[in-house]
Image (cartoon, grey):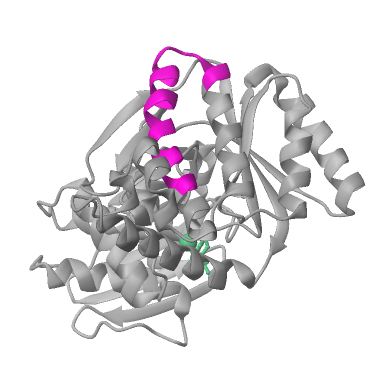
């Protein structure tokens, strides 16, 4: 249900809950999707990412049950399921419910005592569009369990539980960014996250900017296999560099000067992969400083530099992504644009002046069609708060 106001979505969800369960929900939780402004392929190198929680969210209405059953109704999928808190395992018949099963499992594995619940959920985070609908689903469910059982668990730990659920119950070996920002995002701010130790800070966004996500509509199998190759190449770079820099545990620890000095130790391709990560780490500090000063132009340049490096050094772009980024850069009021995610299709993220957004959308849709014969989906986002009860 895109573009329906939050209040309407909540009231429609409450109606559905009442019809299905014959009672009022005890809590309605909102957990947002996310977009990442800067720091791509840095998470698995112990580096930094800079996502926002967006104004698209999963809503999860729940009420406690006296027994140990969890009864779930997914309104958008028109699907229902029930499971016992005493018998938690991934379900191949109802894979959409594995996020909730996993969250319940890993909360209990940490020693938290849970009561059963009835729940209905709905979302306007598009599925599989690079905005992490799955993390929003996990964080919403985890927060509902926390609220109904008065669990003494911090939001960072809740995010870790959700990540574990995604790893073990959905089989997706994701980083921590998506769950973390869905839990801890802040309205009007980006979240700078150190993927090594989960230290974080909120960085205010300049007034009057929007984050715009454009979907190529292309998903290539290559993204998964090449992702694994990139990870292996980063590990290879670390192994070579450790011979001369014993303190290096991950590429995040390497400065641009060190990399240049020891270039000869690395095969050419591995050197270029490492250069992307090392420069991304170095770039982040300056980019965040620019953001703090309200300098959208300087920050946008960091996004453009990041894209060039993803294209030329990391080599994860493709013609469709190039067409979208080129079209975005043609619009006055677009500060910067880059591919986001694993690459080889998927989405771009752009920083755009709020008053240029409609021209941006018009131009990008038209140019993309002209260049590729394909349609792009454009999603305009604002930075919202992380998870909470409504
Ligand atoms: P994304 O990139 O959007 O996170 P994923 O494939 O990781 O895509 O996760 C999508 C899955 O999350 C869906 O297949 C479904 O199981 C679950 N999900 C997302 N949105 C909803 C929803 N509105 N209702 C129920 N489950 C949902
Ligand atoms: Mg996902």
Magenta stretch, residue numbers: 275-298
Q: Which residue lies at the image location 58% right of the left edge and 47% below the top edge?
A: 310
| Quarter of image, res 305 | top right
Q: Is residue 323 visible?
A: yes
| Quarter of image, res 333 | top right
**Residue 268 in the image: x percent, y percent?**
53, 57
Q: Is residue 365 left or right of residue 161?
A: right
**Picture layout, residue 357 above or below residue 171:** above
Q: Which residue lies at the image location 44% right of the left edge and 69% below the top edge?
A: 73
- Residue 22 within the magenta-colored segment of the rendering: no
| Quarter of image, res 315 | bottom right
Q: Is residue 390 visible?
A: no
Q: Quadrant of the C terminus?
A: top left
**Picture layout, residue 81 above or below residue 10:** below
Q: Main secondary structure of the magenta part?
A: helix
Q: Which residue lies at the image location 54% right of the left edge and 40% below the top edge?
A: 8
In this rendered view, identify the residue nearer to me: 47 or 20.
Answer: 47
In this rendered view, identify the residue nearer to me: 10 or 157.
Answer: 157
Q: Which residue lies at the image location 25% right of the left edge and 49% below the top edge?
A: 196
In this rendered view, identify the residue nearer to me: 98 or 229.
Answer: 229
**Residue 24 in the image: x percent, y percent?**
34, 54
- Residue 290 within the magenta-colored segment of the rendering: yes
In this rendered view, identify the residue nearer to me: 15 or 130.
Answer: 130
Q: Is residue 196 left or right of residue 374?
A: left
**Residue 389 in the image: x percent, y percent?**
31, 43
**Picture layout, residue 193 above or below residue 19:** above
């Amino acid at each position: 249900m895109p573009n329906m106001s939050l209040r309407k979505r909540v009231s429609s969800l409450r109606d559905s809950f009442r019809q299905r369960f014959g009672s009022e929900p005890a809590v309605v939780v909102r957990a947002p999707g996310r977009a990442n402004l800067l720091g791509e392929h840095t998470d698995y190198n112990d580096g930094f990412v800079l996502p926002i929680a967006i104004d698209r969210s999963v809503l999860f209405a729940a009420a406690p049950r006296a027994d140990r059953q969890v009864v779930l109704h997914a309104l958008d999928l028109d699907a229902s399921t029930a499971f016992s808190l005493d018998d938690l395992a991934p379900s191949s018949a109802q894979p959409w419910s594995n996020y909730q099963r996993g969250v319940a499992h890993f909360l209990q594995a940490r020693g938290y005592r849970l009561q059963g619940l009835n729940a209905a959920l709905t979302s306007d985070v598009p599925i599989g569009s690079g905005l992490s609908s799955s993390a929003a689903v996990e964080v919403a469910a985890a927060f509902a369990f926390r609220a109904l059982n008065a669990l003494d668990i911090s939001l960072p730990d809740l995010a870790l539980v959700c990540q574990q659920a995604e790893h073990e119950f959905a089989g997706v070996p994701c980083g921590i960014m998506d769950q973390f920002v869905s839990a801890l995002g802040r309205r009007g701010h980006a979240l700078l996250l150190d993927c090594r130790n989960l230290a974080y800070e909120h960085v205010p966004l300049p007034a009057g900017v929007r984050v715009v996500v454009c979907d190529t509509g292309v998903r290539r199998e290559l993204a998964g296999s090449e992702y694994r190759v990139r990870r292996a190449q980063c590990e290879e770079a670390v192994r070579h560099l450790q011979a001369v820099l014993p303190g290096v545990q991950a590429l995040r620890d390497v400065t641009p000067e060190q990399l240049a000095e020891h270039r000869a130790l690395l095969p050419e391709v591995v050197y270029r992969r490492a250069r992307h990560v090392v420069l991304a780490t170095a770039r982040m500090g300056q980019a965040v400083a620019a953001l703090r000063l309200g300098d959208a132009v300087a920050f946008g340049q960091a996004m453009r530099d990041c894209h060039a490096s993803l294209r030329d050094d990391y080599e994860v772009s493709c013609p469709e992504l190039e067409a979208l980024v080129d079209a975005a850069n043609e619009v006055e009021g677009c500060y910067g644009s880059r591919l986001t995610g694993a690459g080889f299709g998927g989405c771009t993220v752009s920083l755009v002046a709020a008053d240029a957004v409609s021209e941006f959308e018009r131009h990008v849709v038209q140019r993309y069609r002209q260049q590729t014969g394909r349609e792009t989906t454009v999603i305009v986002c604002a930075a919202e708060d992380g998870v909470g009860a409504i």
